[in-house]
Image (cartoon, rainbow, N blue to C red):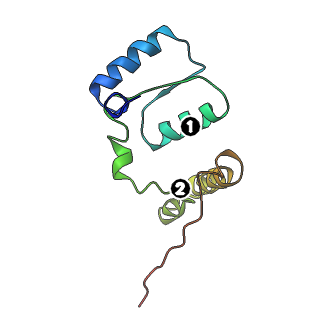
């Protein structure tokens, strides 16, 4: 493929959608944000046939504005939502150890205190 035909744009998306209509997929991912792209990557790495659909361009919406950080739920503790904080921490642990250890890495933070 040359550079022009491999670019992610509206024309390329139309071609891809036409090709996808002719094939069957094991997994359909709706939304090309960080979560959708990650789910598609994980499914493909497991040998599944994946179709990802996105209304705009990849990471057009929420994902492009987010930090892309997988957090442990501390923000939920600030509001007293212990159950959600626990669930978030558990999900973070699973991502780091089982689901996507190849995509997740710890990131140290420096907090200024006076």
Q: Secondary structure at mark 1?
A: helix
Q: Splitting the image into 4 quarters, where does residue 40 fall? A: top right
Establish if 31 lies above or below 74: above
Residue 100 image position (x, y, % from top left): 64, 47
Residue 39 image position (x, y, % from top left): 55, 36
Q: Nearer the viewer, residue 72 or 45?
A: 45
Mark number, residue 70: 2
Establish if 6 lies above or below 110: above
Q: Nearer the viewer, residue 7 or 114?
A: 7
* Quadrant holding the N terminus: top left
Judge from the rendering whether residue 60 lies leftward or rightward of residue 95; answer left or right.
left
Of tags 2 and 1, the one toward the viewer is: 1
Q: Residue furthest right?
A: 98
Q: Nearer the viewer, residue 83 or 64?
A: 64
Residue found 42% across the figure and 40% down from its top: 33
How many C-alpha atoms fall within 10 Å of the one at disc 1: few (<14), some, or many (≥20)? some
Residue found 53% across the figure and 55% down from its top: 70
Q: Secondary structure at mark 2?
A: loop
Judge from the rendering whether residue 38 lies leftward or rightward of residue 4; answer left or right.
right
Residue that numbered label 1 is attached to: 41
Query: Mark 2 touching mark 1, by CB under 8 A?
Result: no
Residue found 49% across the figure and 57% down from its top: 69
Q: Splitting the image into 4 quarters, where does residue 55 fall? A: top left
Residue 18 image position (x, y, % from top left): 39, 13
Residue 67 image position (x, y, % from top left): 41, 57
Judge from the rendering whether residue 32 lies leftward or rightward of residue 83; answer left or right.
left
Establish if 107 lies above or below 36: below
How many C-alpha atoms fall within 10 Å of the one at disc 2: few (<14), some, or many (≥20)? some
Q: Splitting the image into 4 quarters, where does residue 112 fall? A: bottom left
* Mark toward the start of the polypeptide (2 vs 1): 1
Judge from the rendering whether residue 98 lies leftward or rightward of residue 41; answer left or right.
right
């Amino acid at each position: 493929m040359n550079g022009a035909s491999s670019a992610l744009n509206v024309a390329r998306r139309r071609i891809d959608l036409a090709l996808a209509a002719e094939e069957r997929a094991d997994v359909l991912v709706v939304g090309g944000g960080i979560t959708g792209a990650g789910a598609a990557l994980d499914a493909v790495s497991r040998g599944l046939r994946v179709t990802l659909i996105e209304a705009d361009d990849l990471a057009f919406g929420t994902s492009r504005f987010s930090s892309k950080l997988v957090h442990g739920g501390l923000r939920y503790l600030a509001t007293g939502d212990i159950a959600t904080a626990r669930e978030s921490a558990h999900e973070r642990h699973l991502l780091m150890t089982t689901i996507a250890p190849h995509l997740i890495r710890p990131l140290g933070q420096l907090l200024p205190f006076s």
